Image (cartoon, grey):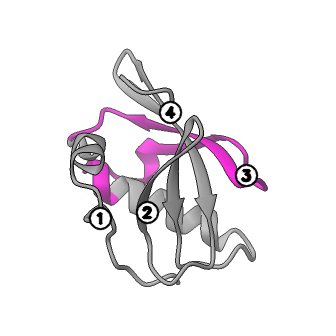
Amino acid sequence: MTAWLRELPGALELTLHVQPGASRTGVDGVHGDALKVRLAAVPVDGRANDALRRFLADAYGVPLRQVTLVRGAAARRKVVRIDAPAARPEREWLRTPGQRSVTRSGG
């Protein structure tokens, strides 16, 4: 499908380029071989990672415990695993440029 999305048995792995401290939280297209995600949260005390997990849990319709940061806790490039996704928002993110963002509080 795409370089940033890996389908596993019962799960998905996303390669992300994360931009913390943005004006709003949402998907902003593709950055190289990663999906670009802007986060309103600042990268202090794990707030941006927490906001990323909450955003993805909400988007994929899963409890927070099913979203795991696999690699990149202190980096902009991250790999995240989503177990048993109930929704597949990446299909809409790719189809609808300019309407991929979801405004949320950065925490």
Left or right of 7 on screen, residue 85:
left
Query: Which numbered disc, 1 or 4, marks the residue that appears first in the sequence?
Result: 4
Number of other residues with Cα within 10 Å of mark 1, as a class: few under 14, some 14 to 19, many 20 or more: few
Amino acid at circle 3: Ala
Query: Which numbered disc, 2 or 4, marks the residue that appears first in the sequence?
Result: 4
Q: CA distance from mark 4 to mark 3?
A: 17 Å
Q: Which residue is mark 2?
A: 54
Residue at screen point 52% across, 66% down: 38
Number of other residues with Cα within 10 Å of mark 2, as a class: few under 14, some 14 to 19, many 20 or more: some
Q: CA distance from mark 1 to mark 4?
A: 19 Å
Q: Which residue is mark 3?
A: 73
Q: CA distance from mark 3 to mark 1?
A: 28 Å
Q: Nearer the viewer, residue 48 or 3?
A: 3
Q: Which quadrant does the N terminus fall into? A: top left
Amino acid at circle 2: Arg
Residue at screen point 50% across, 84% down: 23
Q: Which residue is mark 1?
A: 98
Label at residue 78: none
Q: Are marks 1 and 4 in contact (CB under 8 Å)?
A: no
Left or right of 38 on screen, residue 77:
right
Q: Which residue is mark 4?
A: 4
Residue at screen point 30% across, 43% down: 90
Using the image, determine if residue 19 lies above or below residue 63. below
| SS class, disc 2 | helix
**Tag in front: 1 or 4:** 1
Amino acid at circle 4: Trp
Query: Which numbered disc, 4 or 3, marks the residue that appears first in the sequence?
Result: 4
Residue 60: x and y in percent read 29, 48
